[in-house]
Image (cartoon, grey):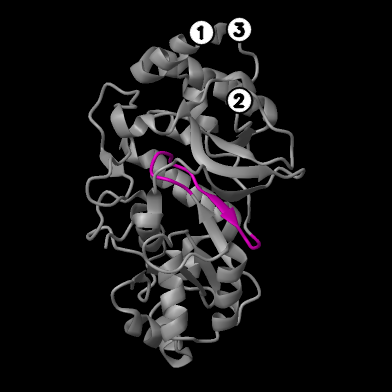
Amino acid sequence: MLKLRFFQELFHDITEDQFNRMALDAVQFQMEENAIYADFVKVLGVDISAIKHYSGIPFLPVELFKTRKVYASPREPEIIFRSSGTTGMIRSTNEVADASLYRSSILESFCRFYGSPEDYLICALIPSPKEKPESSLAYMIDTLIQSGAHPGSGFYLNNQSQLFEILQPSKSLSLRAQRSNLKQHPSTLIIGLTYALLDFAEEYPIVLSDAIIMETGGMKGQRKELLRVEVHDILKAAFGVGEIHSEYGMSEILSQAYSPGNGVFRTPPWMKILIRDVNDPLTWERQGRTGGINIIDLANIYSSPFIATQDLGKLNNDGSFEVLGRFDHSDLRGCNLMVEQ
């Protein structure tokens, strides 16, 4: 059983020593409560008691979420997330024992990077939770919207003309007037699947120089594939902004990393990125070298906090990271196929 201290420290500033201790506590908990993880570690022949640093912890391949129950709690899950995919594709499943951990992770992380959701008009170009109830991304954005409660915030994927009207200066002022408790005018955050942002920019170009435009990925099967820099250049020109922000997450974890521009991401204190050698998954790459992205997400304690993804990336000297692509043999996953054809 995890000590109460683990949860008391989880969403606060965590030192390197604290993180190491919490990660070692988490791996011991996983060995006791997560049968799939325990079996995986035994197959590897790793002695958990000998591990002194989180870099020595085995990382569960993310593919196992498609075929096994990756779960570490005796209680029934409060919510179940599934990755998106085409008909017939095996989808990953993440059973969430405590939805409050996800909500806390969402809000605490967003506040660290962007401030309170109450200060934003949040407009989403993704399917709503009613349309995609198993989408962790929809749940995340809805949590931000409900926390902010701005009258114009909402999901506009299927009503982009209404979003265009809301973003007009006169309409925005009217909406602001409905929030008499606002101490200052809210900023605008438009967050969406990459293809949806491109569609909106093409159909309704509008100068939003003070807005945050944030893409969550998602192009395959919807539009011609473009390089990130090409996408960002198109969006910057259409909306008159200097940078395009990005969010990095997946259905198998409960935390997000954010990029304020140029595809360079930072994690909250309870989340770390390590880069593994593409040919030897038990060896770490040096900073600046491309390899497979491994994630430690301590908020995902009741599922698996230690995940080896199929994403390729690199770590920078300052602790930030970049996502550079995916392994060729990996399935399309996540928000890339959130909207089925």
For the C terminus, the quadrant is bottom left
288 lies above or below 232: above
Residue 45 shows which numbered tag?
1
Separation of marks 1 and 3 at Cα, in angstroms: 12 Å
Please tell me the numbered disc located at residue 280: 2
Tell me residue 285's x, y (percent): 69, 32
* Residue 249 screen position, x and y as percent: 47, 48
- Which residue shows up at 37% across the image and 80% down it? 163
Residue 293: percent from left, percent from top: 57, 38
Comparing 88 with 335, the one in front is 88
Q: Residue at x 46, y 35 (%)?
A: 299
Q: Determine the secondary structure under disc 2.
A: loop
- Which residue of the protein is positioned furthest toward the front in this rendering? 329
Rendered position, 280 above or below 206? above
For the image, the number of numbered tags is: 3
Tag 2: residue type? Asp
Task: Give the residue at x 57% y 54%.
Answer: 258
Frontmost of labels 2 and 1 is 2
Mark 3, residue position:
50
Residue 17 visible in the snapshot: yes
- Disc 3 crowd, CA 10 A, few/some/many (<14, 14-19, 20+): few
Disc 3 marks which amino acid?
A: Ala
1 or 3: mark nearer the eye: 1
Image height of 311 relative to 233, above or below: above
Q: CA distance from mark 3 to mark 2?
A: 21 Å
